[in-house]
Image (tube, rainbow, N blue to C red):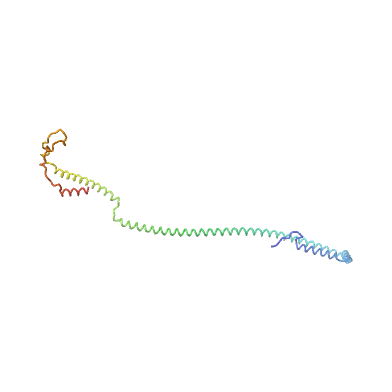
Amino acid sequence: MYKPRTGVSGNPSRRSVQSTISESDTDSASLSPTASRISVGLITSSPNNTMKSSVERSKKRRLESSHRKCFDIIDRCAEKYQKVVAEQEADKASIAQLVQELRDENAREASNALKANSEKETAVAEAERLTKEISQLQQQLESTNTTMQDQVAWDDIQPVLHQTHGELISAATHFGNFIDTLQNKRLASFLPSTEVLNGNWPAHGGPVGATDPAALPGLSGLSNPPLFDPHVSGSVNHQESYA
């Protein structure tokens, strides 16, 4: 990297120019006094030499001034270059940080994409399962509808059932009354005849339990029906089972 030159003493080119000038001065000083006088005499005696030396000095001053200006320009360019390099380094650091952030973001997005893909596969499997279950339910519904086509709806059956139930209750009531009548007739067959019922009962003032058993009316008028009539008993038992 180029390093700027600061000052006259720190500039190698300037030092070379100054060393050249000092060497020329030293050379002139190292001459013998005679040679010095001769040269001085020549210079002083010759107008052309005097003009030439002044032109050279003026040219040297211009060159030195031009060199100084060039070095100043070079120093300014070096400063600008260093400034640009520093800005570039800062930009590189910022860009490197941004690239790292983008890489991290890319890694996170890739992880999220994998997670979303896994969730998608799970959702697809669940959708397939639900589709299969819905298909099975539809088949069961169609089978049930086919089975129920020949059956009557409950709303149509319920009124008929209520009416039939009422009729059954009425028939059961009439049948119970009929059974009671049959039982009464059967029990009436065991009762004594009319003369026994209308016979002379002894008068007594006490309770019935105190009456002499011999004073009770006779039971000669009672008939002796069979104790068990299979026809009547079977009919009664059959009707009681319905009741």
Tell me residue 93's x, y (percent). Answer: 62, 58
- Which image quarter: residue 46? bottom right
- In the rendered image, which quarter is residue 24 located in? bottom right
Observer-nearest residue: 180 or 9? Answer: 180
> How many labels were placed on the picture?
0
Q: Is residue 44 left or right of residue 157?
A: right
| Screen quadrant of the N terminus | bottom right
Work out whether 238 lies above or below 63.
Answer: above
Quadrant of residue 173 within the rendered picture: top left
Q: Position of residue 211 (x, y in %)?
A: 14, 36
Which residue is more in the foreground, 38 or 233? 233
Q: How far across and down, in percent of the image, does residue 129 sit? A: 41, 59
Left or right, residue 36 beside residue 241: right
Q: Nearer the viewer, residue 238 or 36?
A: 238
Query: Residue lying furthest top in this view?
Result: 205
Comparing 199 with 153, the one in front is: 199
Give the x, y percent position of residue 150.
29, 56
